[in-house]
Amino acid sequence: MGGFFRRSSVYMPFLAIVTAFVLGGAVIWVTSGSLDTVFLAYEGLLRGALFKERGLSESLVATIPYIMLSLGIAVGFKAGLFNIGVEGQFYIGAISAAWMGASLQGAPAIVHLPLTVLAGAAGGAAWAAIPAFLKARTGAHEVITTIMMNYIAFRLTEFLISGPLRDPNAAAVQTPRIAPSAELWSLHAVPDRLQDPLNALLTALIFAGVAFVIARWALPRLARRRPDAGRAARLTSPPVQAGVAVVAGVLAFVMLPALTRLGWPFTDQYDRLHTGLFVAVAAAAAVWWLLWKTTIGFELRTVGANPSAARYAGVSITRNIMLGMSISGALAGMAGMMEVLGVSICRCLPLFFSSGYGFDAIAISLLARNDPLGILLSSFLFGAMRNGADLMELTSGVSKYIISLLQALLLLFVAAPPIVRWLYRLRAPGGREESATVTRGWGGQA
Amino acid sequence: MKTATVGPAGSRVSFRNQGWITVVVVVAGLFGAWVLLNAVIGGRCDQACVVGSLAQALRLATPIAFAAFCGVMCERAGVVDIGIEGKMLMSAMTCYAINLFGFQLLKDAIGAEAAGSFSRILAVCLGAGSALLLALLHAVVSIRFKVDQIISGTVINILAIGVTGFMYRAFLAENLPAGPGTFPILNIPLLADIPVIGPILFQQKPLTYVMLLLAFVAHYVLFFTPWGLRTRAVGEHPRAADTLGINVFRTRYVNVLAGGLIAGLGGAWFTLEAVDVFNPLMTNGLGFIGLAAMIFGKWYPFGALAGALIFGLGSSVTSTVSIFRPDIPSQIPQMLPYILTIIVLTGVVGRAIPPAADGQPYEK
């Protein structure tokens, strides 16, 4: 355990968090004029984030988009791209999903839900592909182009919501309510949803897919322990893996509706936590697998680490810039999609819809050093802070915007490890530290 | 333009050769904009409307030009600064607060009129000072600690959003006393009476004049003083400059800090000239547009000014359009400056070569 904490990738983020909270406390102390307020505020923050009614689940609701967006940024970073445009891609994903969810009324969920998810991802990916194309073709730096694309995305969604996509029947300016078949299920609604055989089939297909992936991973490892070569070969053969998937799918189809009827931990119908949580965790696993276990990921990371070496090795820079940015945008678009399909109360996209998730996500992926597991944890930290802030403001009178100050300080400390090391008189770890390099000249040069 | 050939970054394209092309493009662009404007609004932009639009273009170009000058100062010394947006936001907030509360403290002591002028000037100074602090942070993090400059700039931006958002909620959102308002229009004696040119150039608010002066000052400093020569050497080839005994770190520090002051003036424009309120995020990406203007101007102060004027004209024309044609959804013309920025960055308007060491931390 001691060794674990001695790793700089573990203690540095930890020290950064502590330092940010201490400095934030100092700011509260100075602005409010009493030390008690500091403890009152942090106590309220903790209670609001975890212990009040639905506190934990609301924190998780905020965690979901953070996970998706920071995964998007992390994929970009690994490919040497600084995608500040996740916020805009989030908006475009949200509006695409709102449009797809409201059209195709009457289609069954097994068709409609995947299509809507796909629409969100495709919207985000397409929006990110524009700056990627410009970077690959003309060298226009993605930091400025993606920020400009953010502003264009804000205006574009505003225009679409108040014009072409406006719901003519609603008093408020918003898009039409999406069809129930396109909704991401709230956790409390899962037992009811599963009563529909088609929904159960959709779930069974997902279970079968997950089982297939696990079988492909686990069976060869089991086979290696078998002394009998013949049986080992049978265990690793594709039909066996497919068989495991089919069995899991059939079991899920038959058992799940009944099982969730019998006992289901989520009964509170005001709870907003939705199945997107599983999607986000699965996305983290998928990103980890893609980046570290596939050729595509290897090429992306090569282009990110050393473009000239990548070009020398015959890796296409253009293709990987496009690919990395599109994956990044797709993840961000899915975050927007989930906000519309799973969280928004009107199950639509209202005109004054603001997230601010995108900029926080930059801090999260830097804090996690682009590691998917770290992203899950840091996203929860940020989700909890965002959710706890309301109660903190209520109990202590400290403005909830102190949270953005805390997060900015945190970002400063994680982005500049030398500052923290200097504060705590720590020595730099041996060897060259991995740090992101994104400054590679401006636009206008190929 | 004798000095221009000394100039830019590995200067294969010198300012002198490009000069007349730029002039032709600008004139054609102006005429094209006028024709387009008339087509959209139906032939109603007479002389008064043209003069009004141009005066407004200069007004709207002011913050963009300040941002671009900040960029020029930093990047000529080899430091990329994308934190201009954050510095402007911070300065805008500080200016608003100082202007408001300074006025409250002073108005009984020295009278409303004098208190107003005094608090506005104090606000400009402290606003620029607040931007200077952020610039100092950027300098320390990126020059001393050698953190990637884009990351450091992003940190500055997010920090500024956090601090200004917090201060806004805590002190500036409600129950505000009446403040002294923005700077009044300052007519330059005699010059303001010249027909056409007078109303465009010489009936502006003070920061706009400061901006125009600064273009000359920055050009003089960069191309006619030893300091400017050192700055450009550090931006092009810091190792060579170091060998010649130029202190690379000191040069970069001073330029980044000077850039911070300039960005602070740009921030002051928002709350001391444009409107008498502060809103979170009110800088609306103008800092980034300023960087595009800088690239458009090929890292020359006058080029950057020209770029800023084009963006200013773009915004001015779109606002004229939305007055005459309320039926066009306002969001569509509002997208134009951002689209224009992307087009500039893609190099359609001529390839730009940045200072050779732009963005690279110097390892001694």
Image (spheres, coloured by chain):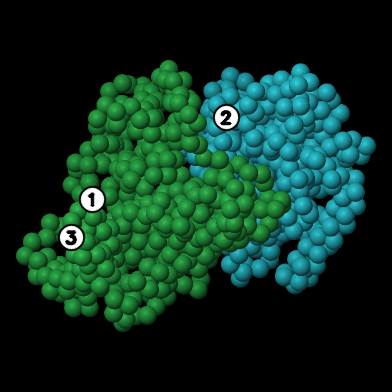
Chain colours: A green, B cyan
Q: Residues within 10 Å of mark 3 (few under 14, many from 20)?
A: few
Q: Residue at the spot x=42%, y=20% of the render?
A: A426
Query: Based on the displayed image, in which of its 4 quarters is residue A254 positioned?
Result: bottom left
| Cα gap from disc 3 to disc 2, whole angstroms | 58 Å
Alpha-carbon span between mark 3 and mark 1: 49 Å
- Viewer-side label of 1, 2: 2
Please state the horizontal and vertical placement of residue A216, each as a whole percent of the image: 28, 62
Q: Which residue does the numbered mark 1 point to in the structure image?
A: A57
Taking depth in this image into account, of A238 and B336 the one nearest to the observer is A238
Q: Nearer the viewer, mark 3 or mark 2?
A: 3
Chain designation of label 2: B
Q: Position of residue B72 (x, y in %)?
A: 73, 37
| Residue A262 in view (yes/no) | yes
Graded by Cα atoms within 10 Å as few (under 14), some (14 to 19) or many (20 or more), the crowding at tag 1 reads many
The quadrant in which the C terminus of chain B is found is: top right
The three-letter amino acid code for the residue at tag 2 is Lys
To which residue does mark 3 refer?
Answer: A228
- Residues at marks 3 and 2, common chain? no
Q: Chain of mark 3?
A: A
A162 left or right of B319?
Answer: left
What kind of residue is marked 1? Answer: Ser
Q: Is residue A424 above or below residue B314?
A: above
Give the class, few, some or many, for how many residues have Cα within 10 Å of label 2's Cα (few <14, many ≥20).
some
Question: Pointer 2: what residue?
Answer: B146
Say which residue appears at 31% left-offset and 43% top-offset: A377
- Label 1 marks a residue whose chain is A
